[in-house]
Image (cartoon, rainbow, N blue to C red):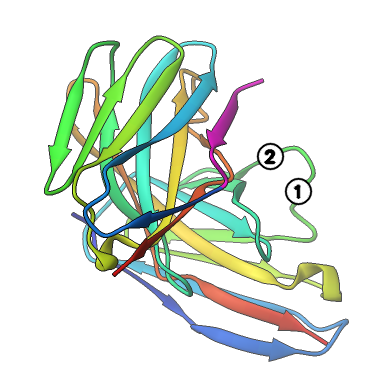
Amino acid sequence: EDQVTQSPEALRLQEGESSSLNCSYTVSGLRGLFWYRQDPGKGPEFLFTLYSAGEEKEKERLKATLTKKESFLHITAPKPEDSATYLCACGGLHFGNEKLTFGTGTRLTIIP
Amino acid sequence: SAVISQKPSRDICQRGTSLTIQCQVDSQVTMMFWYRQQPGQSLTLIATANQGSEATYESGFVIDKFPISRPNLTFSTLTVSNMSPEDSSIYLCSVEQDRGPSSYEQYFGPGTRLTVT
């Protein structure tokens, strides 16, 4: 069974203080590792898909990296508007059932 | 990216009744998914809905409780039947877009917030 574990559960940072969020995963054949941002009362917003170990993707102050067991979401010089819950999900190679398994998320708060 | 809308955005329902949630996508997609997000929890897949075939349900979810329709490549409905307070959740529709060989992106709608009293 696919499993995704995110840490920490919550993180408070001062504006400009860089940090990283962790996503550990276990999957039988990784099809993709997905990162989402979710604001309160809204659906998840797609950020990245990573496909193989060593891959990196960037978007503004966010950079996602992938190893064979973990993914990290690095946040550089964050701003208050980066406050949100960040969700990680893995997609396994299950023929005919292309589902994502989600972690419980990291609730990020950036303090001005 | 796909633009997804859901109706209703929220509803308050009495136990024992049923609610049908609609999901509309602005482009044709093969795979549509329905997720549930209970208060303070992460997302759990209910079922996968492909056009022209029966929906595939995850363990713990059954067709009698969550019937799904997928009449075409841009629309799907999820019905929550015989509701109880435990069904109070956010229900989310999502679609997968194939971006090329081994390239996938999955997008979510805004969600339907259901409260059962």
Q: Position of residue B59 (x, y in %)?
A: 75, 37
Judge whether A19 appears above or below B71 on screen: above
Q: Quadrant of the C terminus of chain B?
A: bottom right
Label 1 amino acid?
A: Phe
Horizontal side of B12 relative to B75 (left or right) equals right
Few, some or many C-alpha atoms within 10 Å of disc 1 (few <14, some 14-19, many ≥20)? some
Q: In which quarter of the image is the N terminus of chain B?
A: bottom left
Looking at the image, can residue B116 be seen?
Answer: yes
Asked which secondary structure carries label 1, the reply is: loop
Q: Residues within 10 Å of mark 2 (few under 14, many from 20)?
A: some
Q: In which quarter of the image is residue A110?
A: bottom left
Q: Mark 1 points at which residue?
A: B61
Q: Inspect the image, locate mark 2, and give the three-letter code of the amino acid beneath it.
A: Glu
Image x and y of residue B107, in percent: 33, 52
Q: Residue at x 36, y 48 (%)?
A: A36
Alpha carbons under labels 1 and 2: distance apart: 6 Å
User: What is the magenta range?
Assistant: A1-9
Residue A41 versus residue B48 in the image, above or below? below
Query: In this rendering, is residue B109 above or below A37?
Result: below
Residue ID for mark 2: B58
